[in-house]
Image: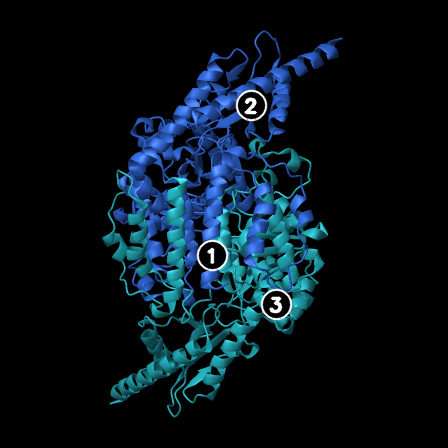
Chain colours: A blue, B cyan
């Protein structure tokens, strides 16, 4: 493809992306395809001769678009939102157009320096302390791929720091602490490192937050059994219910355990720190006081296209001491002189994409005010949904709503159902919901209670979509209740 | 930014990318900026109010472009090439425009299925055996971020497989085998897992290839000292010199060590397997016979924009047994039914970008023939460069050229220099080269010999650029020799 053919195909792509967003609302959220649809439709070998790009672009419309789950659809309430802004698209477009893997400063000075700039900007946007900034000369931020990979980086750094302090520690004594509500990144880190991952218990009455006393007794218990917890992954905004661990209590306990690394995973809810009015709830003060590292994904609710998992550490040497590899072919005079940051030593891989560009585009185009307003809008829409649940006799909240996430279930008025019956009813209700294509939600289980998550944050969601979702939930709920009551009355007969 | 503003900014971006490629040849390869140039130029906080995108787009031209190292420049001969095709750019553009992290089938069916399709297509393009294909029902391929992360995935799978076979093995007995020429991914894996990484010796007379006898004696030695080597990272095309480990001998040795996982890293040279005439040199038959896993980066010399590190395994259960995490909120009826591949259990993270789209675009637009011709062109240009070196009295090859990589040094005719003097001369020569902005090469050290790498493969490189590079190398070489001879003659006086 030559330059002019690219111009033509590029214009067409831009036009088709515009068409996509004009038509998005009228598409199903969840595609109707069956497993194997695309494997069956496409040839099983690549073509011998090159094909014309107009055919390929048309096949994208014909085969790919109908098989996508539309995360940007205004009626997408599943998982957590995944950001997709026009600014983010443009950032990715400019970035890929010069493909240069900025693993060290010289490999592309702009990539490294813009990442330092936007990580400091983002830290300031969120109110993080000076000690997390590159400008401090000691801490700093770096863009990782996902929260899971970010956690792996942090675990390596924490382990090496721990082993420097306790050189006698053995590999099989090391333990990662999470809670039963921590994202799968905790369990995955345990699998990846072949390490024990201890999930500390949390209680419904604490809104699924880790308390200091639980942490303290686990630490004491593990000390007795010769185990060495070296990192705690605490969460601000868990995936299941948006729970916020009690960083104040955790921080106080950790003061007696100075070699315990406190990582705060705020993958989803971290962006709320942009708004001064949520900094208390999201525990900014305690993050700044106690976190050794802090992570949040701007690619979730933070307007930057996937992927952009932002990690800050108080001491950059914890990363580079653990991850520095500099063979001869990667040496540069600027690196040797210590004059620059070489981000290859801040993450797992070597090469890295120029992801800071889309962060820069988003922060400049929205400004601090625009970013805040976007977060506020999501929370406001969720409050609207919550008010509908609260006013209903047939639905109830399972736990207090958290920012833009509500966890709820059917609890039909007048029906006297046991805990396991309610679970069964709600599984049937959820099965009905998940067979629909015009809305998408996800399920979870909170300490044995089956429930449904409603996560707001797709950019095009308006109050009308919440209201439509609510109508639909009520209808499906009524049918689910009717069918279930018939079923159990038959069982009784 | 609304849809129409995006159309305008999108057209502008496409036009500016076209301008970039029309002007690329006239730009410097290496930017003239100094460390800190961008940190000094940009404000230290994000703007309070959003800015107009035209200003932001202009600032990209003003601040970012001048600070990029142009990996697509026809005179870029450093590291290895990083692919950037128009098809790849369009793939990334369509992909980012619907941002949907396809961690399981339901999260976006097209993402999962297209990845299966293009991984089978690519395996066929390279001549890999049926057992690496998804269609085999047992093996399969998956796109990873980089060769380093790919290696981490493989190490985890290999470790868990080893521990299933040898449940008595202790963590600190495990050893990763590489060679002294393995990419930094080997050392990095050792750092990440806190594991011993033993670099087996290779010799210049073997063209830096690992021999079976070296592997065998290491295995015997480690058995005696109670160590457990569980994976060997062998390479087809090392970074320093393009060395190709002797997979035939390695394979034969490994038959006595069935729990040793053989990973073949062909990050750079794997794409040569597309051409039937290079399959012997690149050891296709032995890869198919002995490799437990095989990786190659289409984002290097394989026409697909960064990142696209392709991994195939003979047994997909080795990945999923090691990496499967399925909390309630990630369960789907298709996943529960075992009817689909959920790629989240094939890599380190959870979310993943829709990278298969650009692989699909590239393979269809180039076709098998176009892909092969591209590889052949790079090798032919390198042969031209090699012929110039061979004909010269003042330069020599340090080892035989490998595909599109030549490792050479100054060895001035008539000067009788010791090994360390030659190293010193070549360091001075390289320092001259690396202070230029119109060409980029990288250095390496091969068993104590300092040398310079010349890697061909940027899409716009033609014979004229090789000839210009050669003129420049001769000029800089002559000055380096003259200065060095003056220096040592002064030292003698």
Label 3 sits on residue: B369
Quarter holding the C terminus of chain B is bottom left
Up/down of B140 relative to B254, above or below: above
Which of these two is toward me, A369 or B328? A369
- Quick one: quadrant of the N terminus of chain B? top left
Label at residue A360: none
User: Is B210 or A278 nearer to us in this picture?
Assistant: A278
Dot 2 or dot 1, earlier in sequence: 1
From the image, tell me which residue sits under label 2. A451
Label total for image: 3
Residue lying at 29% horizontally and 63% vertically, measured from the top left = A337
Whether the residues at callouts 3 and 1 have beta carbons within 8 Å, the answer is: no
Q: Quadrant of residue A380?
A: top left
Mark 1: secondary structure: helix
- Where residue B356 appears, as percent x and y from the top left, is 56, 52
Which residue in the structure is indicated by mark 1? Answer: A8
Q: Are marks 3 and 1 on the same chain?
A: no
Q: Residues within 10 Å of mark 1 (few under 14, many from 20)?
A: some
């Amino acid at each position: 493809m030559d330059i002019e053919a690219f111009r033509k195909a590029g214009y067409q792509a831009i036009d088709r992306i515009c068409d996509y967003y004009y038509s998005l609302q009228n598409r199903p959220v969840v595609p109707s395809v069956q497993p194997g649809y695309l494997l069956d439709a496409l040839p099983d070998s690549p073509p011998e001769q090159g094909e014309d790009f107009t055919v390929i672009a048309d096949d994208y419309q014909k085969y790919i678009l109908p098989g996508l789950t539309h995360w940007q659809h205004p009626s997408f309430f599943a998982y957590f939102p995944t950001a997709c802004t026009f600014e983010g698209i443009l950032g990715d477009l400019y970035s890929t157009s010069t493909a240069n893997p900025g693993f060290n400063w010289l490999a592309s000075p702009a990539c490294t320096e813009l990442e330092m700039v936007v990580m400091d900007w983002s830290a300031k946007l969120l109110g993080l302390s000076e000690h997390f900034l590159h400008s401090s000369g000691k801490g700093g931020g770096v863009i990782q791929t996902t929260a899971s990979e970010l956690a792996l980086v942090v675990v390596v750094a924490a382990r090496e720091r721990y082993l420097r302090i306790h050189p006698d520690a053995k590999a099989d004594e090391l333990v990662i602490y999470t809670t039963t509500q921590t994202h799968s990144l905790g369990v995955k880190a345990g699998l990846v490192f072949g390490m024990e991952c201890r999930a500390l218990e949390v209680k419904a009455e604490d809104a699924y937050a880790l308390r200091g006393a639980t942490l303290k007794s686990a630490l004491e218990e593990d000390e007795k059994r010769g185990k060495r917890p070296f990192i705690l992954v605490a969460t601000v905004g868990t995936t299941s219910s948006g729970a916020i661990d009690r960083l104040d209590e955790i921080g106080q306990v950790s003061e007696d355990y100075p070699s315990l690394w406190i990582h705060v995973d705020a993958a989803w809810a971290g962006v709320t720190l942009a708004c001064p009015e949520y900094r208390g709830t999201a525990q900014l003060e305690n993050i700044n006081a106690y976190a050794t590292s802090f992570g949040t994904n701007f690619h979730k609710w933070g307007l930057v296209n996937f992927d952009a998992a932002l990690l800050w550490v108080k001491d950059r040497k914890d990363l580079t001491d653990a991850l520095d590899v500099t063979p001869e072919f990667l040496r540069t005079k600027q690196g040797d002189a210590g004059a620059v940051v070489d981000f290859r030593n801040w993450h797992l891989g070597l090469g890295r994409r120029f992801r800071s560009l889309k962060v820069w585009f988003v922060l400049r185009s929205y400004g601090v005010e625009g970013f805040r307003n976007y977060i506020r809008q999501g929370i406001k829409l969720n409050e609207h949904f919550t008010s509908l649940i609260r006013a209903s006799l047939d639905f109830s909240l399972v736990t207090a709503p958290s920012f833009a996430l509500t966890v709820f279930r059917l609890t039909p008025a007048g029906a006297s159902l046991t805990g396991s019956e309610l679970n069964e009813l709600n599984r049937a209700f959820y099965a009905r919901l998940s067979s629909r294509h015009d809305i998408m939600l996800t399920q979870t289980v909170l300490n044995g209670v089956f429930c449904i998550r409603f996560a707001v944050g797709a950019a095009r969601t308006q109050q009308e979509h919440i209201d439509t979702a609510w109508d639909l939930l009520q209808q499906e709920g009524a049918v689910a209740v009717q069918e279930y009551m018939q079923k159990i009355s038959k069982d009784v007969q």
